[in-house]
DNA sequence: AACCAGGTCTCGA
DNA sequence: TCGAGACCTGGT
């Protein structure tokens, strides 16, 4: 099958998901426990996988009307410029358990390290799918040999990670109801768990629970809000401002801004 | 060799 | 509700 109007490099390297790798021009990933390979063909992407077309389109959010979304968030010159510059960058609809567990690991670490932590966790607990492919583990798989979490280089995130697996396993997290809930109830509920604060809750809400108004603010986004919009202060305050400014699809704007900052960082690093 | 990283937690005001 | 400090570890 083909996916129309998508830029794989932008979508899969913008820091929203941590399990995609580009090898010899093709993007390799694991979605819903199955391997998937994508290749950019002009503005479209060719998909190779045993997943159903519906599952693929679901993951890449082809039920979203991007025309409407971009019209809605295009509130200022800066963001409309980014929408044009990074055309084809799409938000993904990730599995809520994998997304929340991964973002618990993502706190106070850089992306390369996050990728390594998630990879080690998958190799240690996940199901082997191929020569070099492991699924992200289920809570059960983690709890079955949780002592081995210490070998994954998670640092102080280790205990939070295992405890969260236990909570999900024990049915203390109802992702389906979090999807249906209001955005504010959703993040409030998520933040009750150890290791999930405002920012991670926003990431989970945005990347896996269909709350497109969620606007995660990390240090980079915080700097942009201050320098370009003159907004600073507590998370609660800056987050409320951003959701008000960009509207009901603010999360999409956030990802374009985040990616733009990431691109700037990459060029700085390449110069060294 | 420092510095910093898709933050969270705890605690005092 | 908000700001300040501590915090595992490994990239860069």
Image (cartoon, coloured by chain):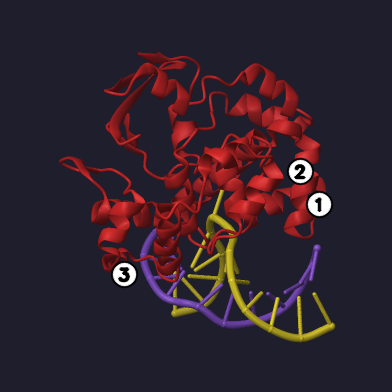
Chain colours: A red, B yellow, C purple
Residue A10 percent across, percent down from the top left: 49, 32
Q: Which chain does tag 3 point to?
A: A
Secondary structure under tag 1 reads loop
Q: Circle 1 sits on which residue?
A: A231
Residue A213 % position (x, y): 69, 37
**Neighbour class for label 1 at 10 Å: few (<14), some, many (≥20)?**
some
- Mark seen at residue A150: 3
Q: Label 3, label 2: how many angstroms apart (C-alpha)?
A: 38 Å
* Residue at the spot of label 2: A242
Q: Is residue A206 among what the camera can see?
A: no
The reply to whether residue A183 is in sight is yes
- A142 or A255: nearer the viewer: A142
> Where A126 sits versus A162, above or below?
above
Rendering coords of residue A266 (x, y %): 50, 46
State whether discs 1 and 2 lie on one chain. yes
Q: Earlier in the sequence, mark 3 or mark 2?
A: 3
Label 3 close to label 2 by CB (< 8 Å) = no
Taking the image as shown, residue A29 lies to the left or right of residue A252, namely: left
Q: Is residue A171 left or right of residue A230?
A: left
């Amino acid at each position: 099958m083909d996916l129309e109007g998508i830029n794989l490099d932008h979508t899969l390297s913008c820091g929203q998901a941590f399990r995609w790798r580009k090898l010899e021009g093709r993007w390799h990933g694991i979605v819903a426990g199955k391997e998937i390979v994508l290749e950019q063909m002009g503005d479209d992407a060719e998909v190779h996988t045993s997943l159903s077309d519906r599952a693929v389109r679901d993951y890449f959010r082809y039920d979203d009307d991007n025309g409407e979304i971009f019209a809605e968030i295009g509130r200022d010159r800066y963001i409309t410029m980014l929408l044009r510059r990074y055309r084809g960058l799409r938000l993904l609809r990730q599995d809520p358990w994998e997304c929340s567990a991964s973002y618990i690991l993502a706190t106070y670490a850089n992306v390369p390290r996050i990728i390594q932590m998630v990879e080690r966790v998958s190799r240690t607990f996940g199901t082997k799918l191929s020569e070099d492919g492991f699924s992200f583990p289920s809570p059960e798989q983690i709890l079955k040999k949780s002592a081995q979490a210490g070998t994954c280089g998670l640092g102080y995130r280790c205990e939070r990670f295992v405890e969260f697996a236990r909570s999900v396993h024990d049915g203390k997290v109802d992702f389906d109801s979090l999807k249906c809930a209001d955005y504010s109830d959703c993040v409030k509920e998520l933040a009750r768990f150890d290791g999930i604060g405002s920012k991670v809750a926003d990431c989970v809400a945005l990347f896996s629970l269909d709350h497109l108004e969620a606007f995660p603010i990390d240090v980079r986004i915080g700097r942009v809000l201050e320098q370009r919009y003159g907004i600073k202060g507590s998370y609660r305050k800056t987050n409320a401002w951003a959701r008000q400014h960009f509207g009901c699809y603010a999360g999409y704007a956030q990802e374009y801004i985040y990616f733009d900052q990431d691109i700037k960082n990459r060029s700085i690093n390449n110069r060294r």
